[in-house]
Amino acid sequence: MKLFGLMVAMLAVSSLLCCGGARAQNMDKAVLNVDEEVTAFAYAPDGRIIFSVRRMFKASKKYELQRDDIWLLETNGKRKRLLEGQKFTHGDKPFTYQVESFTWSPNGHIVAIQLYTSTVDPEDDSREDARALLLLDDNGKELHPKGPDALVTNAESPMWLRDSGSLVYLVEEIAPRQLFSMQYLYMSGGPPTKAFEGRTFIDAERIPGSNAAIAVERDRNMDGPPRMQKLELLAQDDKELATLDSFVGAGGLSISPTGRLAAYFLDNEVLEVRSLEEPNKVARMRVGLGVLKWSADETKIYLKRTIEKKSADLVIFDVPELAPHPRGQQPLLLEPEPRPLLHGLTIREYAISPDGRFLAVVLPGKRNLQVFGF
């Protein structure tokens, strides 16, 4: 970060954390700017921000590699580099990666980093792409839970258990990312072990503050409709909550902060919200497919109106009242009025701070990270 940017960051973060109950600045001006090409970021439980910065370098005359650096922005405004990508190695072949996402452990001291990796065979220039997890503590120490290799290969969507010492992750079973199985990973060491053996899922997300997850299950042969399950990750117990009319696929499921509600896309247009306490109560809205997040009080949903890392505007709309869904009848399809945020500014990625007071976004183009107060 340039010196000026660092000074701005330190002043902004310090003012955000020291102002007690005072409200932050409005959304006309960013209160924090990280002037780097940010590829991914996430808030820690205590409000720190971990982020990755795109780094390209020449490995030889033939290969140019990308290996993102990983930084942690502390609550006092200081930042430290947790990982220098150019020095990170994996095997003896040209290896490149880009950070896709971060998932913090409940205690906020370990982060599971989702990588999209490519390995090239110099003999024939063939390339092997895969997703993998890298585990770091918040001091930058690499954790090697499965042996000498720091990467947990063919792994994605980690779900931490409450002890912060183990997690469950998804393994692709039917490509491209249609069905997944689950495996346990233990920070204390040892090979991954199977979870819910023999079963396959389209998507899964942990219920905050628990050892349970909501998953959308489907048989390996793709017969029958998708089924919403509540999975007890530690005990490997399950309870079926609902049979869904459809489900858009991996990444389309989101659980509210208290674990009372689930939201998911039925198709490229329709979002369904379901009560997890009374699963027959639902609401359907035509909002368009995108990346959604919940407000802290669960009364509103934020939506970036495109998928994955593509750029689009960010809107917000109210969560409607849920109503019983009688069998054989289609719920009323609502047409909410989305309200634009940031004056319709196009963004690439976004996150809401744990206290719900700040919105962080990555902008297209330079891909710098900016934080706005509500």
Image: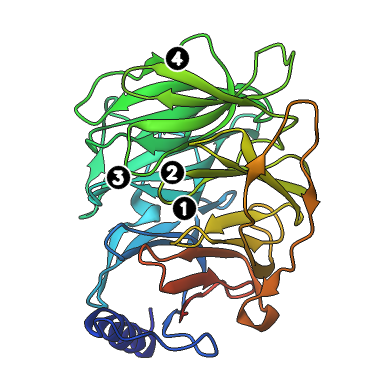
Helix or strand or loop: what does disc 2 sit on?
A: loop
Task: Note whether 287 is above or below 34 in the view shown.
Answer: above
Q: Dot 3 corresponds to which residue?
A: 105
**Relative to 145, is 265 on the left or the right?**
right
Q: Residue at x 40, y 36 (%)?
A: 159
Circle 3 or circle 1, nearest the eye: 3
N-terminal of the two: label 3 or label 2?
Answer: 3
N-terminal of the two: label 4 or label 1?
Answer: 1
**Relative to 284, is 100 on the left or the right?**
left
Q: How is the image coloured?
A: rainbow
Q: Dot 2 corresponds to which residue?
A: 259
Q: Is residue 267 visible?
A: yes
Helix or strand or loop: what does disc 1 sit on?
A: loop
Q: Amino acid at mark 1?
A: Arg
Crowding at dot 4, Cα within 10 Å, few <14 / some 14-19 / many 20+, comes out as: some
Distance, label 3 to label 4, CA atoms, is: 22 Å
Q: Position of residue 62 (x, y in %)?
A: 60, 49
Distance, label 4 to label 2, CA atoms, is: 21 Å
**Relative depth, front residue between 165 and 226:** 226
Task: Note whether 33 is above or below 90 in the view shown.
Answer: below
